[in-house]
């Protein structure tokens, strides 16, 4: 029977240590990379949501046309995981956003917001009055909701000021 020399044992042990250290470094790199990727996906959806809200608000403040037809209002339906945008009747969606890496958590469940052309204010679906083509928003003045990441502990909180129809990022309480 052939015996393995002491030098061969040390060479084998060195190789084993190098492989273990390389495996640990690779696992740490993969873990950190996966966490960073989840963070980037969440930030992308957050910016996409804010961009869509700003686009709709800017659209109604400057025009009462969508395509070649006039509209009376644009309706934003906000619910957990998605946002739909409708013109007048709510039958045909003109835009939509599905959130896969984050979810919207709206105080009270879901809400529908109406944006009126050439008006500064916007309103919850059943919470406004119109007198002489001027929209009057009734209480509550703001709608609070948050967007939380599905795979990380990130959260962004918003308030929609109905009097100015402005989306504000606010600090999350708690």
Image: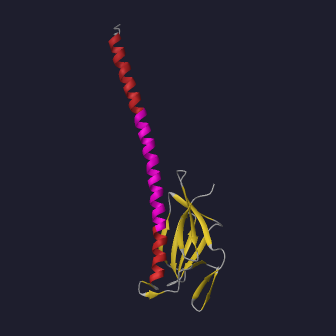
Residue at image point 52% right, 58% down: 102
Colour option used: secondary structure
Q: Position of residue 20 (x, y in %)?
A: 41, 28
Q: Position of residue 21 (x, y in %)?
A: 40, 29
Quadrant of res 68: bottom left
Report the label total: 0
The answer to whether any part of residue 83 appears in the image is yes
Q: Position of residue 42 (x, y in %)?
A: 48, 56
**Which is nearer the eye, 108 or 140?**
140
Q: Is residue 27 magenta?
A: yes
**Which is nearer the eye, 21 or 120?**
120
Principal secondary structure, stretch drawn in magenta: helix
Quadrant of res 4: top left
**Considering the image in quadrants, where does the C terminus appear?**
bottom right
Segment colored magenta: 24-50
**Which is nearer the eye, 11 or 43?**
43
Q: Position of residue 167 (x, y in %)?
A: 53, 70
Q: Is residue 157 magenta?
A: no
Residue at image point 45% right, 84% down: 63
Above or below — where is 21 with respect to 58?
A: above
Answer with left or right where residue 107 lies relative to residue 83: right
The answer to whether any part of residue 149 appears in the image is no
Above or below — where is 66 with respect to 152?
A: below
Above or below — where is 115 with respect to 50?
A: below
């Amino acid at each position: 029977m052939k015996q393995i020399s002491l030098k061969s044992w040390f060479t084998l042990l060195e190789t084993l240590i190098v492989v273990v250290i390389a495996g640990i470094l690779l696992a740490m790199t993969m873990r950190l990379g996966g966490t960073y990727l989840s963070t980037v996906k969440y930030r992308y959806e957050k910016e996409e949501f804010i961009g869509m809200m700003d686009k709709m608000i800017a659209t109604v403040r400057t025009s009462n046309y969508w395509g070649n037809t006039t509209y009376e209002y644009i309706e934003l339906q906000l619910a957990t995981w998605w946002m739909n945008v409708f013109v007048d009747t709510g039958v045909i969606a003109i835009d939509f956003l599905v959130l896969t890496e984050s979810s919207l958590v709206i105080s009270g469940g879901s809400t529908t917001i109406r944006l009126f052309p050439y008006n500064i204010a916007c309103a919850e679906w059943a919470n406004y009055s119109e007198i002489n083509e001027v929209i009057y928003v009734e209480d509550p003045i703001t709608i609070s909701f948050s967007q939380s990441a599905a795979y990380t502990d990130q959260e962004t909180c918003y308030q929609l000021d109905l009097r100015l129809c402005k989306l504000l990022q606010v600090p999350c309480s708690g």
